Structure formats: structure tokens, C-alpha cells
Image: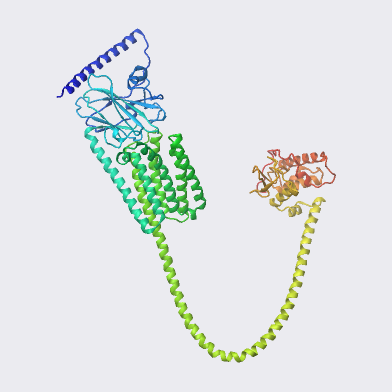
Amino acid sequence: MPQSHKLGGRRGRLGGLGRTLMQFLLGAGLLLASLLGLSLPAMAAPEDTLVVNPSQPALYLDENYYSMLEDPSGRLTVAEVQSPAWSRRFVQMRGSGHPPNINRTHSTYWLRITVRHAPTETAAWYLELYDSHIGQAVFFRPRPGLAAGYDSVVTGANLPFATRPHPYKNFLFDIPPRPGQTATYYLRLHSDTRTSFRAMLHSSAGLIPELSVQYWLLGVFYGILVIMLLYNLILFFFLKEQTYLSYVLYVLSGTLLFLTEDGLGFQYLWSDWPEFNHFIGAAAPVLLLITFAVYASGFLDMASRLPALHRLGRWVVGLSTALLVLDAAVVHSGFSFWLYLLPYGLLYYSAFCAYRNGLRPARYLLLAQALVASSLTFLIMRKLGIDFYNNAYTVYSLYAAFVAEVVILSYALGEKLKGLMDTTLLTQHRLLKQLRKKHQAQDRLVEQMRENQELKDRLNTELEALVAQRTAELRRQNETVATQNRELLEANGLLALQSAAIEKLNNELSRDLHAEKAARIEAREVDFGEFSQIYPDKDACLRYLADLKWAHGGYRCRKCGHEKSCEAREPHARRCTRCRYVESATAGTLLQKCKFSIVKAMYAVFLLHAHKGNYSSSELARVLELRQATGWAFAQKVLAALQRRRQASDYEDGEAWSHLLLDATAEAEITEAETVETGR
């Protein structure tokens, strides 16, 4: 055995004795302090000890098995975090409320892991960090033997791939065997993005098979993507269909995204350029959004089928892209994945609308995006630090969903083109049938023309003899017809004049009749039946009120004072062109918020005005078929308005009843006694 190994074994045994002695002294001190009634400073709850056993090839580092310390300054050393002043500040993750990820990108995070090695341990263990985007990861291991202190392994996504202790896509740190010992390990993490603390402890025997399975599955995944890329690229060159090109660009963007997410791109393609790896990691999701938007727009024919959504989608995608670039270059919020929800949601809604409009292949786009969205739920939970079904299946579910999406979208493109080809073939078949019928009709026409020519030759000789005679007769008939036409035109002109005169008389008679009825109303000589003929329904009453309020352009906004308006959705209402305030025809009148028929209300105002207020409320309720309380309440309101009108400076004796309708205090609430008359 080499001398260094012997010395390391002696130092390990001495170190074990030293730690046992320190534990004994610490226990004695605590016992003495308790006996003397002394109080010691409170210590933070330590993490659970992780017991490793060669029979378990892999152990997931649950939140119970590590403690966390946030270092805002980023200057603490491993010796300082071991000191009692800083050691007691470590908090166990479970129950602390802190998400298991780097929540503040300007801080440095320390993780403390305590491992109890098996007494018969002979092989090394390996600590794997799953998140390959951690900017800097430093692993501190206790030096073996009697030597104090820790040695460190420095790596990270901000450093070249060659700095990693093992050529693996994730961060992998080896833990030497320590039979029967309990050792404390530290991880110092710093990153510009919200990376997670997810980690796994592997045994030497179980590491190689697991890595082989991972690389084999990833090889199958990227092999499928390459096959789909080449297949659809060939179809694009063959069919010249632009949608295939956008599909190829979308799959290529997804491939770049996955190469940065799983670390294979950094391992095999750009291992010496960590800045480029960071750039690809930020740019790939944006490219994925843009290429998918272009693909979905072409696949769904949004420009022709959904022009409004097409224009809105271009603005939404453009704005989201600008915000994503700003966040990646300047803000570094760590929550940029929320900016993808609106454009992807809008494109998903567009696919649903296209499917409802008859584009059946759009259902495949809906299915594919539903699969990806369900798998993205687990990714978002991990980004937010929420422990939501975190296992090997959910971690790699996005890979399976993306493969399924790529295959489904390729099939959807094929079905769409097949539908277009079927439609084209059907149209061509119909055109051929129409051409065949046209040729047959042309043949029949040629035969008919030949027969007609023969008939023409036979008849020409007979017709020439009759032409002169018939021409003379036609000339005489034309002269007769021309004379009759002139007479008919004169008669028609006379009839037109008579019709115009009759129509004018009818209009004048109708106006005179309406004016007579209106005059009778003003003269207080009509009953409710005749009043209802002048104002038969709510629309006629609203039209009358609107003409009274805004006669001769007298509109003025009640909210901002603006004098220009336009028609509103409500009948005979006006909308202010400046503040968009809508004023109804009844607003500001005696009939505002009237809870029974407006025709009855106008007749009630007319009766009370005609009788100068000397009209009983019971008789008013009987005539209008209202409740006694409703008739009394409305009569009081009208009488109050009549009293105010008599006290006005511009009041004239015998003025029209319509002045009461524009009472300025009509905005007050009608009493609760005025209820809606039902069944009337």
C-alpha cells in the first residue's frame, strides 16, 4: 500500500477519535450548563443525516437532507460558514417556506449535506446536480485523514466544459469512500438565473447504467427530431410549401432549446464557449415562440380565415418577443416564462376558432399543444421552486411531449396537404366533367349549325320575296306604335302628376290629423285611448322626450360639458364623443327611473297638468290601472314639479304640459312605493 494511503488511514482514524472527543466534551458542557442553569444560544435545526448504503444505487436529496444559507455579499468562505456564528444560520429547507432554488440571483447560496457512510463502504459515491444552468458550483469535501480543512472542485455553466470533474452533461462530483464515518459536505452556488437545488446521490455501481440509459434515451429523442427535420425539409424542397419550412425551423428551435436545457449542446457542440451557451439558452425560447407563431399562422391560414386574430397575434408575439429580449439582456427577472403564456394562449385559441370554422387538421394542433402545456406545468413548478410531482418521469415528460408534438404536427401537415390535394383532384374531376359536357354540347351545336345553314339556304329565297312586303308593313306598324307610345307617355306623365298630388294630399291630411290630435291633447280634450294613438309605445315616448331634450342641437354632456355626441346603443340615447358618457332620453326628466309604463307616466303628467293638479291619485290609479300607492307617489312627484314650474321666472299661464317633462330635479330616486306593475 502506498505511504500516502497509510498516512491518510492514520489521519482518518485520528480524525475520528478527535471528533469523538469533541462530541464528548460538547455533551459534557451541555450537561454542565443545564445543571448550573445556564442558557446557551439557540442553534438552528440541523439537516437530517443521509445514510448511504451500497444496496441503494441512487438516493434523491429530499429537502430534509440539506440545509441552506444565503450569502448576499458572496464573500463567505468555507471556514467562515463552518464557524458557530454562521453554522447556526443554516436552515433546513423543509418547513422553512424557502423555495428549493436560487431565489435571488445577486446572492450566493450555501448548501450543507451530512452523509453517514456505510461501515463496509469501499467504492466512491457521486453527487449529481440536475440543473445544468448553475453559473458557478463549488463542491467542498473534507480532506481525508488528519489534515484539516476542505478541498474544493470548481465548475459551472459560466466556465468551459473542461472544468467539470467528469465529462457529463450535468454537474457530477465524486465523494471518496469513508467507511463508517459521518462527513459534512458544502456546495457553494451562484447563478444569474433561478436554478434549482435538485440533486441525486449515486453509487459507483449504479451510476454507469443510469447514465447509459439517459444518453440512450436522449439519443433516441434527438434521432427522432433529426429524422423529422430531414423528412420535412425534403418535403419542402419537393412540394415548395412554405408551412413545411416554418415547421422545420420550429423543430430546429426546439432542438436548440433542449440541447441547452439538458446540457448536451454544451458538452458536445460548444464546450469552449460558455457565453455562447448562455446566449443560446436565452435565445432558443424566443426563436421557438417566433417559429411556432409563423408555423401556426401558415398552418391555420389565419390571414384569410381569422384576419382579426392574425393581426392581434402579430402584435402580441412582437411585444412578447421584445419583452423577452429586454428581460434576458437587462432585467434578469427569472420569471420570463410567464411572457410565453399570452402568445401561446392566443395561438391555441386561434386553432380552436379555425377548427370551429371547418379546418379539421387544426384539432391535431390543439392536441399537440395540450400535451406540451401539460408537461410545461411541471417545468414551471420547478422554476417557481414548488415540489409538484418531481421525479424522473415529470422531468423528462417535456421531451416525450415535444416528440409527440413534432410527430402530430407533421401528420397534421400531411393531412392538410392531403385535404388540399383531394379538393384539387375533386375540382379537376369536376372541371373534366364540365369540359366533356362542353365538348358534347359543342358537337351538338356544330351539327345544329350545319342543319340551320341548310335550312337558311332554303328559306333565304322565300324570305327575300317577303322582305319588301314585310318591311313596308313594319314601317307602317312602327309609325302606329310610335304614335301610341307618345300618347302613352303623355298619359303616364298625367298619371304621375295626379299620383304626386294625391300623395301630397294624403301627407297633408295625415299631418293635419296628427296636428289635430296633438292640438286636442294640448287643449286637454283626449282620453288615454286617444293619447295612446299619439304615443303608442315606449319608442314613440322616448323619441318625443329626445326631441324635447335635444331640440335644435341643444345637447350638452352632463358629465364633462362637451357639446358633440353620437348615437348610443340604447334607443334614442346619446353618447358623448369626448368622455363616452351615455345619456338616455329619460335622464334629467320627470320620467327618469320610472318603474311602470312610460306611456302611462306621460299620460299621468298630461292629466295632472290639464287639471292643474286637481286630480285625485285614486282616480289616476284607476284610469291608468296602477296600484294606489304607485299612483299617489307619482302624482306627488308631478305635483312637486308643477309647483316648481309655476315658481319659475319663465312660467307662462297656459303653457304646454311638455314643460313639466324637462323638470331639472327629476334625477332624485323614485320612492320605493313605485314598483313595477306586472301583469298589466
Task: Tell me if I can see residue 310 in this picture.
Answer: yes
Task: Tell me if I can see residue 389 in this picture.
Answer: no
Q: Furthest residue to the top?
A: 36
Total marks shown come to 0
Q: Position of residue 553 (x, y in %)?
A: 74, 48
Q: Nearer the viewer, residue 196 or 227?
A: 227
Q: Is residue 606 above or below residue 14?
A: below
- Kindly indicate the quadrant of the structure image that contains residue 413: bottom left
Q: Is residue 395 above or below residue 98?
A: below
Q: Is residue 660 above or below residue 410?
A: above
Q: Is residue 60 above or below residue 316?
A: above
Give the left or right position of residue 25, taking residue 652 as reference: left
Colour convention = rainbow
Q: Position of residue 577 (x, y in %)?
A: 66, 45
- Kindly indicate the quadrant of the structure image that contains residue 38: top left
Q: Residue at x 73, y 78 (%)?
A: 486
Quadrant the N terminus occupies: top left
Q: Position of residue 348 (x, y in %)?
A: 45, 47
Q: Furthest residue to the front?
A: 272
Q: Position of residue 138 (x, y in %)?
A: 32, 28
